[in-house]
Image: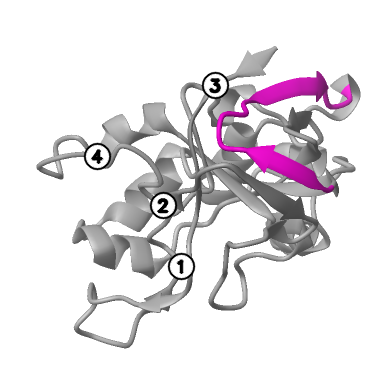
Amino acid sequence: MIYKLEAISTGKIQDLPYSTKRPMRSALNKEKYSGKMWLTHTGFAEDEQEYKGHGGPNKAVCLYSKKNYELWKHDLPALPPYAMFGENLTATDLDEAHVYFGDQFQLGEAILEVSEIREPCWKIQEKYKIPDLIKRMSSSCKTGFYFRVLQEGYVHDSDHLKLIKSADASTRLSVYELNDIYYNDNKNINRLTYVLKNPYLTSDRISKFERFLKRAQK
């Protein structure tokens, strides 16, 4: 199965003018690159991340679906064509409900594995001046998600994602379902227990769900 990408984008850390409340340095504003770029275990060679919680081996590449842009069509005079929320990969229709932790994709020479949810932060809310953006994005479960890089390699700007391995059926967990539990149903013991059986989640995510479960069992 091939999943089309609208854009592959990277960005450099810069001072951004969107917030009057506090300094805002970010690589949120990304642009399409031309030609090919080396994709490492921590992300594209020319992509940068500003602070803790972004980037690293388990958040090497961020994807957001172009379909999700529609959530914001009544809030903005015009929707960006790509990288609306600073994602590296803007997918045509690969969204949270149809991708599972542990799914593996080939992108150019690289191999990626779905590894983490994206937690929306204040910077994207400040950029678009939508007061409830974080709350709406979280509760909708349409946050985007991250890949870890299993195999480094060159990625051309015309490459698309090819599904090469599906996650184990016995513990299959979609990004949408994990988001729904995390944001909307984090006292549900049965669902929390199921999440913790997933072998592909990061140690940080497991720790958070263990705390949820411990609290729910009191």
Q: Which residues are magenta?
A: 152-168
**Which percent across, then down, holds residue 42?**
74, 61
Give the residue at mark 4.
72
Mark 3 → mark 1, Cα distance in angstroms: 24 Å
Nearer the N terminus, badge 4 or badge 2?
A: 2
Nearer the N terminus, badge 3 or badge 1?
A: 3
Give the residue at mark 2.
31
Q: What's the residue type where badge 3 is placed?
A: Lys
Image quadrant of residue 100? top right
Query: Closer to the camera, 43 or 198?
Result: 43
Where the N terminus falls, by quadrant?
top right
Q: Secondary structure at mark 3?
A: loop
* Tag nearer the camera, 4 or 2: 2
Check disc 1: other Cα within 10 Å, few if <14, some if 14-19, many if 20+: some
Nearer the N terminus, badge 3 or badge 2?
A: 3
Which label is found at residue 27? 1
Mark 2 → mark 1, Cα distance in angstroms: 10 Å
The residue at the far top in this view is 1
The answer to whether one can see residue 18 in this image is yes
Q: Residue shown at 57%/42% (left/top)?
A: 35
Image quadrant of residue 205? bottom right
Q: Residue shown at 23%/85% (left/top)?
A: 21
Disc 3 and disc 1 in contact, CB within 8 angstroms: no
- Please say whether residue 172 is one of the residues in the magenta stretch: no
The residue at the far left in this view is 77
